[in-house]
Image (tube, coloured by chain):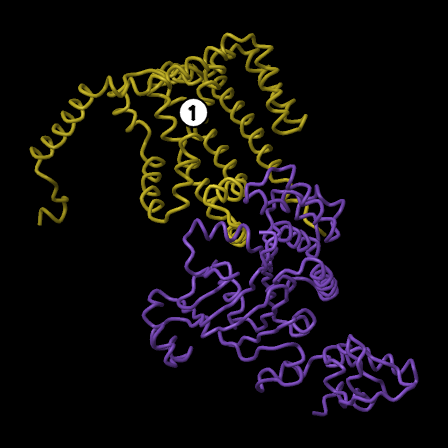
Chain colours: A yellow, B purple
């Protein structure tokens, strides 16, 4: 009855060999292709460095004005702009300006990358049920797999630094972008699509003149989610060398510096709320035409 | 192209079966398998059976039927939003069924325009941008299409609303946008799929008048789908009545009202205000001689209008004359009254 109380598992030796074989295989792959793959990501690294340099080298009053200008252009709400100003001033006053700029730069690049990859994938997914059936479980894995686990192969391949951090963040943050693009396009009113067909629209015209514009509010919700999830990854990404607000938090955990952790944590919360309010208000403004219903 | 005369629409032996193996049941249906049998034995739905309709250029063809009769399916075969299982749809001599995809798109862009029951406007575009949608799809430059769109918006009574969004307009006004969008295409065929069914009765009558007035100028081949016999009789130069996917009667409004093909049609006609449909020549006594001192009535005048005229004139009889002035017959108040209450 031994098998009844203890799950009959694979032979210890065989299991050890299997793990070793996979490890060796991946290590071999890393040795032979690591450099090529690193080369492939060089443009991304340049983008990251350029963006970070811009955020750090530009004097703070100009960056502040720039952020406020973007916030106003997107929301047309002075209340939100005032909130952004207060958040930025507090962050600066408590000497977290540089780390915050690094984090914002990282989030910006991650979001741009997620949009650039996520929207096309979402479009393809919306067009074919088969593609949707294949991609959906992959997205499930990406969202539920503990991030530490996929940090291991990324670090083995690319070492520690900005690019592996970026990949880890994008892997975690891209699923809502893809899912909501797919959903938004699938929810487009069938009657309107039929009208586009009746007027002789081809697939491209339908996509750009009907499907994407009508899915835009949903896509904006996806972008908002992606930004939030990217911010949530800041601390974990700092474990593999991404600079920014995550590093002091990591230091605070290791040394039990309560205040340091709290200040930096609140700074992350502060920029998260900023991004969230601005992107949501922009999304709402995009669908203003839907709200004024004839009485 | 300038002197090309549009050849109208001819639908020949059109069948539509819905289901995964539609093609394999077509022979059985042609040999008389009924809709109920097809559904019970094979799980397929018979949408249309042996439809043959000729729609001459420049006329309004109404297709009338209750829900489930296949009328919306039928109109979607004309621009092939639905592919038939068998049959031909000739628009200006071209069989739409056989067009390859790229040609079909060109055909839809230039030969047909459609108005929908639920309007199907683009909510994120203004009225003006909705109106140029068809022209944009055709690839016409924006300034030029804006001119066209403004002209049609003005024509359907929407001047001043160009910058509004569809949601800011009432149903009737939204459908005016739908109509302007279709007309801006300047296609010879105008397909109207229950275009007015979602509108309330007063606005519906109003829109019918808009369409009839427009048709005097534009002379398009209009296919109009409706479930409302009054609407059918008011608009249709020709009417086809559809039931369970089959045409049960075709003809002018006079034919339908005076000679219903079966009890089903007769049942419909019962509810109709005959005085507004039946023409005076259908009830008159033919005669070549014209007694003097009687008011004259033009052929094609409705019974109701004739009665009103005679009542105003305080006379018991009228002389029916053709457009060229010849006497066609004599009509009495008794005959007119009889036609209104259907003593036939």
Marked residue chain, label 1: A
Q: Is residue A222 above or below residue B89?
A: above
- Report the side of A131 relative to B75 (left or right): left
Q: How crowded is mark 1: few (under 14 residues within 10 Å), some or many (20 or more)?
A: many
| Number of numbered discs overlaid on the protein picture | 1
Q: Is residue A233 above or below residue A95?
A: below
Q: In this view, does B302 lie above or below B120?
A: below
Return the residue nearer the eye: A216 or B282: B282
Q: Is residue B162 above or below residue B25?
A: above
Return the residue nearer the eye: A194 or A229: A194
- Report the side of A167 relative to B82 (left or right): left
Provide the secondary structure element on which disc 1 rests: helix
Give the percent coordinates (x, y) of residue B255: 64, 81
Return the residue nearer the eye: A276 or B312: B312
Return the residue nearer the eye: A214 or A200: A200
- Report the side of B13 relative to B159 (left or right): left
Residue pictured at 41% horizontal, 13% vertical? A49
Give the percent coordinates (x, y) of residue A9: 12, 41
Give the percent coordinates (x, y) of residue A60: 57, 10
Residue tagged by mark 1? A110
- Picture quadrant where residue B29 is located: bottom left
- Report the side of B319 relative to B162 (left or right): right
Give the percent coordinates (x, y) of residue A108: 47, 22
Residue pictured at 9% horizontal, 31% vertical? A17
Quarter of the image that includes the C terminus of chain B: bottom right
């Amino acid at each position: 009855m031994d098998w009844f109380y203890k799950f009959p598992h694979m032979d210890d030796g065989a299991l050890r060999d299997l793990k070793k074989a996979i490890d060796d295989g991946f290590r071999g792959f890393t040795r032979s292709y690591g450099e090529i793959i690193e080369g492939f990501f060089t443009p991304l690294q340049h983008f990251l460095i350029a963006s970070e340099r811009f955020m750090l080298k530009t004097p703070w009053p100009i960056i502040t004005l720039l952020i406020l200008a973007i916030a106003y252009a997107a929301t047309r709400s002075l209340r939100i702009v005032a909130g952004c100003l207060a958040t930025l001033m507090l962050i600066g006053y408590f000497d977290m300006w540089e780390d915050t700029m690094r984090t914002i730069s990282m989030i910006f690049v991650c979001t741009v990358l997620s949009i650039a990859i996520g929207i096309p994938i979402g479009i393809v997914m919306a067009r074919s049920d088969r593609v949707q059936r294949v991609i959906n479980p992959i997205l499930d894995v990406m969202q539920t797999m503990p991030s530490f686990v996929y940090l291991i192969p990324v670090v083995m391949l690319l070492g520690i630094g900005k690019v592996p951090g970026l990949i880890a963040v994008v892997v975690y943050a891209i699923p809502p972008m893809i899912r909501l693009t797919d959903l938004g396009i699938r929810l487009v009113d069938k009657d309107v699509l039929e009208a586009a067909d009746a007027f002789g629209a081809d697939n491209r015209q339908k996509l750009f003149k009907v499907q994407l514009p009508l899915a835009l509010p949903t896509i904006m919700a996806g972008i908002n989610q992606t930004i939030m999830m990217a911010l949530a990854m800041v601390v974990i990404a700092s474990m593999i060398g991404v600079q920014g607000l995550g590093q002091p938090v990591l230091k605070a955990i290791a040394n039990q510096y309560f205040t340091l952790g709290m200040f930096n944590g609140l700074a992350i919360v502060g920029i998260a709320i900023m991004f969230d309010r601005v992107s949501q208000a922009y999304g709402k403004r995009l669908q203003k035409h839907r709200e004024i219903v004839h009485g | 192209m300038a002197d090309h005369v549009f050849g109208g629409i001819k639908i020949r032996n059109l069948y539509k079966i819905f289901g995964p193996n539609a093609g394999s049941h077509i022979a059985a249906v042609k040999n008389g398998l009924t809709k109920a049998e097809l559904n019970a034995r094979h799980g397929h739905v018979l949408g249309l059976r042996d439809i043959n309709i000729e729609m001459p250029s420049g006329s309004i063809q109404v297709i009338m039927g209750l829900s489930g009769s296949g009328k919306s399916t039928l109109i979607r075969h004309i621009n092939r939003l639905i592919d038939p299982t068998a049959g031909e749809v000739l628009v200006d001599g071209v069989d739409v069924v056989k067009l390859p995809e790229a040609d079909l798109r060109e055909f839809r862009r230039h030969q047909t325009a459609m108005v929908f029951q639920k309007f199907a406007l683009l909510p994120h575009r203004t009225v003006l941008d909705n109106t140029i949608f068809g022209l944009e799809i055709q690839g016409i430059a924006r300034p030029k299409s804006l001119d066209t769109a403004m002209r049609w918006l003005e024509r359907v009574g929407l001047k001043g609303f160009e910058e509004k969004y569809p949601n800011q307009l009432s149903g009737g006004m939204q459908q005016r946008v739908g109509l302007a969008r279709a007309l801006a295409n300047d296609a010879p065929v105008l397909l109207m799929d229950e275009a007015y069914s979602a509108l309330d009765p007063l606005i519906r009558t109003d829109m019918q008048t808009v369409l009839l007035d427009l048709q005097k100028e534009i002379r398009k081949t209009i296919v109009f789908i409706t479930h409302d016999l009054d609407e059918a009789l008011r608009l249709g130069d020709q009417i086809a009545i559809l039931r369970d996917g089959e045409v049960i009667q075709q003809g002018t409004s006079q034919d339908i009202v005076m000679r219903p093909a079966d009890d089903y049609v007769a049942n419909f006609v019962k509810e109709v205000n005959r005085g507004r449909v039946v023409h005076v020549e259908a009830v008159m006594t033919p005669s070549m001689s014209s007694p003097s001192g009687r008011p004259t009535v033009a052929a094609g005048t409705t019974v109701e209008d004739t009665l009103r005229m005679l009542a105003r004139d305080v006379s018991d009889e009228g002389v029916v004359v053709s457009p060229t002035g010849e006497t066609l017959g004599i009509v009495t108040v008794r005959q007119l009254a009889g036609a209104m209450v259907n003593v036939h």
